[in-house]
Amino acid sequence: MHVNVSHINAGEVGDSAEFEIQGENPDISDLELTQPISGRVQIVKLDDGLQLLGQVKLVFNLECYRCLDGYEHEANLKLSAIFADKPEEDEWPIDAKDEIDLTPLIRQEALVSIPIQQLCQEDCAGLCAECGQKRSDGHQHEIQEIIRQPRIKKG
């Protein structure tokens, strides 16, 4: 997702432009997007770079920790970043064509948005410890108890 920023970069401090993001489906490693990305960003010219502020919506697949089923996770990401020709440690690069690539920034924010406990539903019952099938409201499994007689050592 490259944005040409030559007109902003050539302008004066405080110049800005807004960009609508619609139908973008970039290849983001570690994430399987299920819908195109949508959102809006604003880019403002600074003394020594560009400031990007905005919000994007992503929908991607995750796996439930309890039942192992896949489910869609929706993330509304707030973006805030500085882009520079010679980026410092916490800045993103502006390439030689006066373009910025939003994909690495969106990937980073999306990975941080993944919940620690990935659940398809808050009350997911998970898998049955006996048969391995997905538990549901009607799932029943006969549990056979094994009664062990204590062993008596003879003398």
Image: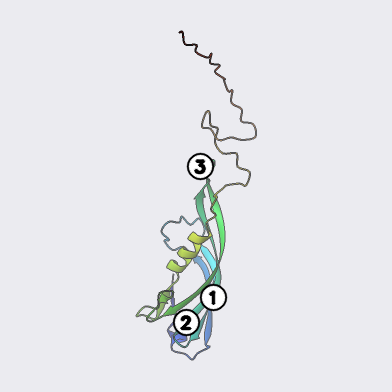
Left/right placement of residue 98 relative to residue 58 reads: left
The alpha-carbon separation of the residues under discs 1 and 2 comes to 10 Å
Q: Residues within 10 Å of mark 1 (few under 14, many from 20)?
A: some
For label 2, the residue is 50
Tell me which amino acid carries mark 2. Answer: Leu
Q: Residues within 10 Å of mark 2 (few under 14, many from 20)?
A: many
Say which residue appears at 49% left-offset and 85% top-offset.
45
Say which residue appears at 54% left-offset and 40% top-offset.
67
Say which residue appears at 51% left-offset and 77% top-offset.
52
Residue positioned most to the bottom:
12
Residues 60 and 135: in front is 135
Residue positioned most to the top:
154
For label 1, the residue is 53
Residues 95 and 85: in front is 85
Q: Which mark is residue 107?
A: none
Location of residue 155 in the rendering, given as x and y in whole percent from the top left corner: 45, 8
For label 3, the residue is 68
Tag 1 or tag 3, which sits nearer the N-term? 1
Location of residue 149 in the rendering, given as x and y in whole percent from the top left corner: 53, 13
Q: Secondary structure at mark 1?
A: strand
